[in-house]
Image (tube, rainbow, N blue to C red):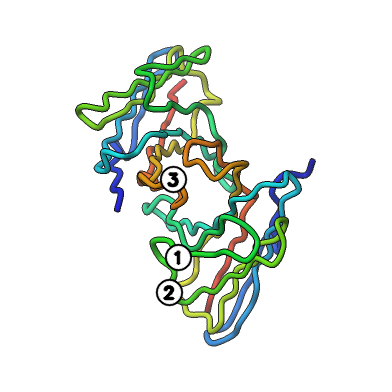
Amino acid sequence: NAGVTQTPKFQVLKTGQSMTLQCAQDMNHEYMSWYRQDPGMGLRLIHYSVGAGITDQGEVPNGYNVSRSTTEDFPLRLLSAAPSQTSVYFCASRGGLSGTDTQYFGPGTRLTVL
Amino acid sequence: GENVEQHPSTLSVQEGDSAVIKCTYSDSASNYFPWYKQELGKRPQLIIDIRSNVGEKKDQRIAVTLNKTAKHFSLHITETQPEDSAVYFCAANSGGGADGLTFGKGTHLIIQP
């Protein structure tokens, strides 16, 4: 199993550009989520999904959209990038919908918005 | 929502000594408390976790304790080694479970040779 994969690893955008961060998992996990990590801030939840067709907002959802058309994929879209979205983005998944299941992280995407 | 406080932000210990990192949480319904280790430029990796039905869990040199009454939990690393140098994050689940994890701001652990 590849586990949780993310592409790209690095990305530089100009203010106002849009892009999609890709996330995929091959563990048949129902629950997937996106976090952003900023220096000194820990990881903060952006959006999550408990299954195909179901998404919900986390702590910091503004400026981001998600969709979940398949169990495997959970892309994160930036519609109009802003410098405040410069961050490292981690996708994560867990096997069950119970909050006590182990969560696994992808390798991350480092995004810079100029 | 859940709020997780983590202390200290930086911890420097001599190789071979013990290290303790402490976290408090606010949501009394939280019942899952993982600890992640993150090396520079890498993803967070789960090192140990504890669920609210136990007070302590140990895995070789690493242990976690949980005090639900006081709403705090701690990570203990004994006989520290250079490879233990990293940033450590505590986390707690939100009471409903589906809402994901709330993380502390991290502790930079430095092992001095």
> Which residue is outermost to the bottom?
A16
Asked if the residue under mark 2 is in contact with the one under mark 3, i.e. CB atoms within 8 Å, the reply is: no
Numbered disc 1: secondary structure = strand
Q: Residue at x 45, y 57 (%)?
A: A45
Q: Residue at x 47, y 28 (%)?
A: B49
Packing grade of label 3 (10 A; few <14, some 14-19, many >=20) is some
List x then y, in percent, for residue A114: 52, 79
Sort mark 1 into few (<14), some (14-19) or many (20+) by Cα contacts within 10 Å: some
Amino acid, disc 3: Gly
Q: Chain of mark 2?
A: A
- Residue at 59% over, 45% down: B43
Residue B18 in the image, given as x and y percentages of width and height: 38, 16
Q: Closer to the camera, B62 or A29?
A: A29
Q: Nearer the viewer, residue B72 or B61?
A: B72
Disc 1 versus disc 3: distance between alpha carbons?
14 Å
Q: Name the subunit of mark 1.
A: A
Give the residue at mark 2. A62
Q: Which residue is mark 1?
A: A57
Residue with the most extreme right position: A1
Looking at the image, which is closer to me, A27 or A23?
Answer: A27
Expressed as whole percent of the image width and height from the top left, the position of residue A79 reads: 56, 82
**Image disc number at residue B97:** 3
